[in-house]
């Protein structure tokens, strides 16, 4: 998904953000329905949260393969350790919104960490 968003946010950051918000909102609904179908909170079968989390991680970061691999690894790290507020969201926010928001919080951390790495060289 970030491969699609990458060129889009290079052309128009505002348009890319609007599209991201719309896709994120739709994904909250899809994740809610998936939780209902799988009868499981934040089922590992739901991956749209990971896809959009990775998209947010790469937002306005370099898109070379090294940065994408680093972004993926950093995002997964933050998604696993769930720094605040991701852990609180994971525990307290129900439904698809919780599924999506905890990964978005992890992605914000990953995005900032990747920016730091890119800046340092």
Image: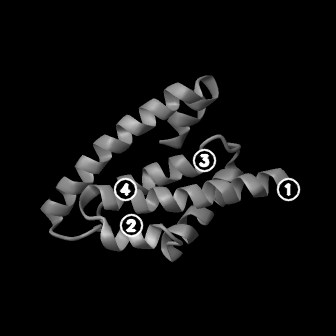
Question: For the residue carrying disc 1, how many other residues have a C-alpha within 10 Å: few (<14), some (14-19), or many (20+)?
Answer: few
Who is closer to the viewer here, 80 or 44?
A: 80
- In space, the residues marked 2 and 1 are separated at their CA atoms by 31 Å
Tell me which corner region of the image, top left, top right, bottom left or bottom right, holds residue 3: top right
Vertical arrangement, residue 89 with respect to residue 96, above or below: below
Contact flag, marks 4 and 3 (Cβ < 8 Å)? no
| Mark found first going from the N terminus, 2 or 4 | 2
Residue drawn where x is 67% and y is 55% of the image: 112
Spot occupied by residue 110 in the image (x, y as percentages of width and height): 61, 59
| Label 1–label 4 contact, CB within 8 A | no
Q: Which residue is pictured at 31% across the width and 55% down the height?
A: 97
Q: Dot 4, crowdedness within 10 Å: few (<14), some or many (≥20)?
A: many
Looking at the image, is mark 2 or mark 3 nearer the viewer? 2
> Which tag, 1 or 4, sits closer to the chain's start?
4
First in sequence: mark 2 or mark 1? 2
Q: How is the image coloured?
A: one colour
Element at badge 4? helix
Disc 2 to disc 4: CB gap under 8 Å: no
Q: Residue furthest right?
A: 121
Disc 4 to disc 3, C-alpha distance: 16 Å
Residue denoted by label 1? 120
Q: CA distance from mark 1 to mark 4?
A: 30 Å
Which residue is labeled 3 in the image?
58
Q: Where does label 4 land, which residue?
A: 100
Cα distance between the residues tagged 1 and 3: 17 Å
Asked which quadrant contains residue 11, the reply is top right
Q: Mark 3: few, some, or many residues within 10 Å (few <14, many ≥20)?
A: many
Q: Considering only order in the chain, which callout, 3 or 2, is on the residue closer to the N terminus?
A: 3
Q: Position of residue 21 (x, y in %)?
A: 41, 38
Q: Position of residue 29 (x, y in %)?
A: 23, 48
Instruction: Find disc 2 in the rendering and name its residue.
Output: 89
Label 2: state its secondary structure: helix
């Amino acid at each position: 998904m970030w491969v699609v968003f990458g060129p889009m946010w290079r052309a128009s950051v505002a348009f890319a953000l609007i599209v991201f918000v719309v896709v994120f909102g739709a994904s909250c609904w899809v994740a809610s329905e998936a939780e209902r179908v799988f009868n499981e909170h934040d089922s590992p079968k739901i991956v749209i949260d990971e896809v959009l989390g990775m998209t947010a991680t790469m937002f306005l970061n370099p898109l070379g393969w090294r940065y994408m691999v680093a972004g993926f690894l950093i995002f997964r790290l933050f998604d696993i350790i769930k720094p605040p507020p991701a852990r609180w969201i994971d525990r307290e926010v129900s439904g698809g919104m919780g599924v999506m928001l905890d990964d978005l919080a992890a992605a914000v951390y990953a995005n900032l960490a990747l920016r730091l790495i890119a800046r340092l060289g």
